[in-house]
């Protein structure tokens, strides 16, 4: 039933996809500018180096001799390419301090990108909650501004944890498959890498799925929402995990198909829609577990078997 209710909530809030799209385009342009600022000095320094120019000239000479059918000159050009490539590697090693600084800059920009994206997800979550609880159709920008402080604090906590978790999982899986299990066929390694990474992402989503709804719907403070999210008592973790595995696989498949069969045009909709459907599931899961009734469309209210009655204080604070 959660899948069915999630789909209905997603469709009911589909207009938010276009607002997220515009927001994501703006934040992506900002991120591209920051990535360019970090990468440009190193790339320019490498492109201007004598070692790199020699490598390019060697490759051009090899291709020219290949096209013109000069095997003797091809051998000499290939040797020159190998020598130039070694010189480029030595140049890069000599500038490893700049490389480490660049890597740090890329990680920082990735944090900024994830932080900005998280602000949009928080606003989308608030819009979905307003729609589910009161049928209110709140404006995206106003909701973003109104919840900016809470969204910033949430993402200052969530973004670093998420990045560290993703990097750690990707590194461990890569080392396991491509360094330890070297005897496995390459295609099998790719299959196992994707499978294990999907499982890792699903585990992360399972343990953080209650964080956003607890802040927005439950009106919990930052510490209380964090503790509530990672407390798994009576939360049917296995069921939530299985739902996330299925949704992540479907989302990966849809986005891959959109990128391949529409030459990338459809991902303008599928990417923000992917975030929206995951957020919808988080709120449906939270409402169901907390035994709260909610709308999935104008004419349908989902009522739990044992509806939770708010206390007088909760009612007047608007918490239920």
Image (cartoon, rainbow, N blue to C red):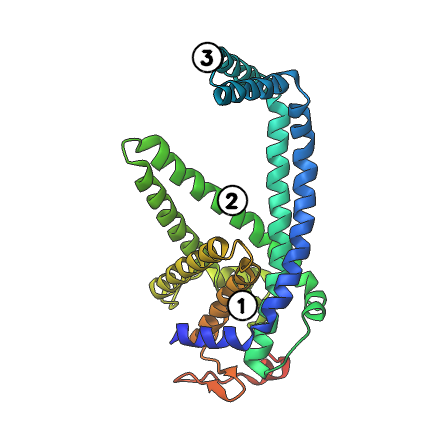
**99 or 14, which lies in front?**
14
**224 or 214, which lies in front?**
214
Residue at label 1?
Answer: 214
Measuring 68% from the left and 56% from the top, which residue is drawn there?
A: 26
Proximity of marks 2 and 1: CB atoms separated by less than 8 Å: no
Measuring 58% from the left and 80% from the top, which residue is drawn there?
A: 314
How would you rate the neighbour count of disc 3 (Cα within 10 Å): few for under 14, some for 14-19, many for 20 or more? some
Separation (CA) of disc 3 from disc 2: 47 Å
| First along the sequence among labels 2 and 1 | 2
- Identify the residue at the far left of this view: 183
Numbered circle sitting on residue 75? 3
Secondary structure beneath disc 1?
helix
- Quarter of the image with the N terminus is bottom left
Residue at label 2?
Answer: 164
How would you rate the neighbour count of disc 1 (Cα within 10 Å): few for under 14, some for 14-19, many for 20 or more? many
Secondary structure beneath disc 3?
helix
| First along the sequence among labels 3 and 2 | 3
Where is residue 268 drawn, in percent x and y? Answer: 57, 59
**136 or 67, which lies in front?**
67
- Quarter of the image with the C terminus is bottom right
Left or right? Give the position of 244 relative to 138: left
| Residue 93 shows in the view | no
Numbered circle sitting on residue 115? none
Where is residue 84 drawn, in percent x and y? Answer: 55, 15
| Residue 139 shows in the view | yes
**155 or 50, which lies in front?**
50
How would you rate the neighbour count of disc 2 (Cα within 10 Å): few for under 14, some for 14-19, many for 20 or more? few
Measuring 31% from the left and 31% from the top, which residue is drawn there?
A: 182
Instruction: Count the numbered circles shown.
Output: 3
Separation (CA) of disc 2 from disc 1: 23 Å
Separation (CA) of disc 3 from disc 1: 67 Å
Left or right? Give the position of 316 relative to 299: right
């Amino acid at each position: 039933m959660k899948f069915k209710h999630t789909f209905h909530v997603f469709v009911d809030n589909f207009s938010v996809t276009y607002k997220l799209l515009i927001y994501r385009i703006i934040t992506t342009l900002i991120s591209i500018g920051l990535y360019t600022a970090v990468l440009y000095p190193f790339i320019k320094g490498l492109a201007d180096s004598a070692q790199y120019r020699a490598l390019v000239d060697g490759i051009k000479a090899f291709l020219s001799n290949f096209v013109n059918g000069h095997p003797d000159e091809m051998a000499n050009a290939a040797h020159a390419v190998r020598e130039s490539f070694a010189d480029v590697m030595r140049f890069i090693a000599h500038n490893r301090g700049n490389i480490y600084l660049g890597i740090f800059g890329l990680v920082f920009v990735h944090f900024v990108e994830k932080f900005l994206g998280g602000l949009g997800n928080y606003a989308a979550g608030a819009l979905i909650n307003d729609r589910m609880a009161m049928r209110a159709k709140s404006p995206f920008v106003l909701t973003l501004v109104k919840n900016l402080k809470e969204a910033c604090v949430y993402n200052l906590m969530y973004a670093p944890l998420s990045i560290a978790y993703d990097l750690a999982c990707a590194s461990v899986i890569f080392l396991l498959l491509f360094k330890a299990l070297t005897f496995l066929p390459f295609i099998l390694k790719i299959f196992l890498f994707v499978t294990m990474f999907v499982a890792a992402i699903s585990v992360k989503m399972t343990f953080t799925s209650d964080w956003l709804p607890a802040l927005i719907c439950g009106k919990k403070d930052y510490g209380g929402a964090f503790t509530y999210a990672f407390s798994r008592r009576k939360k049917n973790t296995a069921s939530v995990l299985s739902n996330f595995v299925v949704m992540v696989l479907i989302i990966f498949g849809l986005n891959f198909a959109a990128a391949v069969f529409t030459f990338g045009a459809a991902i303008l909709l599928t990417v923000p829609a992917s975030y929206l459907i995951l957020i919808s599931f988080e709120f449906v899961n939270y409402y169901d577990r907390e035994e709260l009734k909610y709308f999935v469309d104008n004419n349908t209210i989902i009522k739990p078997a044992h509806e939770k009655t708010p206390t007088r204080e909760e009612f007047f604070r608007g918490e239920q």
